Image (cartoon, rainbow, N blue to C red):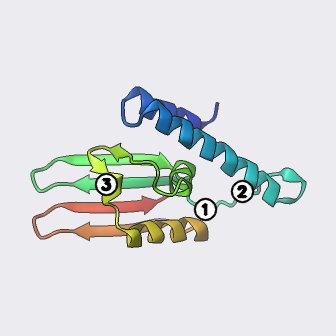
């Protein structure tokens, strides 16, 4: 069992996602790996040290609460491939509240293999959200 699959199962164990949502993610993850293997000659998967492997989300609230989430990029890609059919609520952050511009920005950055800070939003009330690709 690989790291991405273990992350999905841990999210089920913690109650972050349902078993049905996990099944959808695992299916999308498997189809993603199959299409990656077909995309390279001989079915071997090419690796690039320049592509991000993790998405880190940091939320800091004005009252001092902090949430740090680190998810495998392949899990994010699988969720995005499901086309929003998956309503994830991670760390109190509801995925439905993501605007279409931010989703497009994340998809484009993943497609281009970008690394580094992707989003840095600081609100007037002191709340701050940062998203990184590592």
Q: Pointer 3: residues within 10 angstroms few (<14), some, or many (20+)?
A: some
Q: Earlier in the sequence, mark 1 or mark 3?
A: 1
In the rendered view, tell whether residue 47 sits above or below residue 65: below
Counting from the top left corner in percent of width and height, residue 33 is at: 70, 48
In the rendered view, tell whether residue 112 sits above or below residue 32: below
- Tell whether label 3 touches label 1 (CB within 8 Å): no
Residue at image mark 1? 51
Q: How many marks?
A: 3
Residue at image mark 3? 58
Residue sitting at 46 percent across and 47 percent down? Answer: 71
Q: Nearer the viewer, residue 19 or 70?
A: 19
- Tell whether label 2 touches label 3 (CB within 8 Å): no
Residue at image mark 2? 47
Residue 111 appears left or right of 100: right
Q: Which residue is situated farthest in the front direction here?
A: 85
Q: CA distance from mark 1 to mark 2?
A: 8 Å
In the rendered view, tell whether residue 84 sits above or below residue 15: below
Q: Earlier in the sequence, mark 3 or mark 2?
A: 2
Residue sitting at 31 percent across and 54 percent down? Answer: 58
- Assign the N terminus to one quadrant of the image: top right
Give the SS element for disc 1.
loop
Q: Nearer the viewer, residue 66 or 13?
A: 13
Give the SS element for disc 2.
loop
- Tell whether label 2 touches label 1 (CB within 8 Å): yes
Q: Which residue is situated farthest in the right direction here?
A: 42
Give the SS element for disc 3.
strand
Q: Pointer 1: residues within 10 angstroms few (<14), some, or many (20+)?
A: some
Residue 7 appears left or right of 95: right
Image quarter of residue 57: bottom left
Image quarter of residue 30: top right
């Amino acid at each position: 069992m690989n790291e991405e699959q273990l992350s999905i199962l841990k999210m089920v164990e913690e109650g972050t996602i349902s078993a049905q949502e996990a099944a959808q993610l695992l299916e999308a993850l498997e189809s993603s790996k199959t299409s990656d293997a077909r995309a390279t000659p001989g079915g071997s998967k090419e690796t690039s040290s320049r592509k991000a492997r993790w998405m880190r989300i940091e939320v800091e609230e004005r009252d001092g609460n902090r949430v740090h989430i680190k998810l495998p990029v392949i899990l994010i890609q699988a969720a995005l491939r499901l086309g929003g059919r998956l309503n994830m609520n991670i760390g109190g952050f509801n995925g439905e509240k993501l605007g279409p511009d931010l989703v497009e920005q994340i998809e484009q950055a993943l497609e281009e293999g970008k690394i580094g800070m992707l989003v840095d939003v600081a609100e007037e009330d002191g709340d701050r959200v940062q998203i990184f690709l590592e």
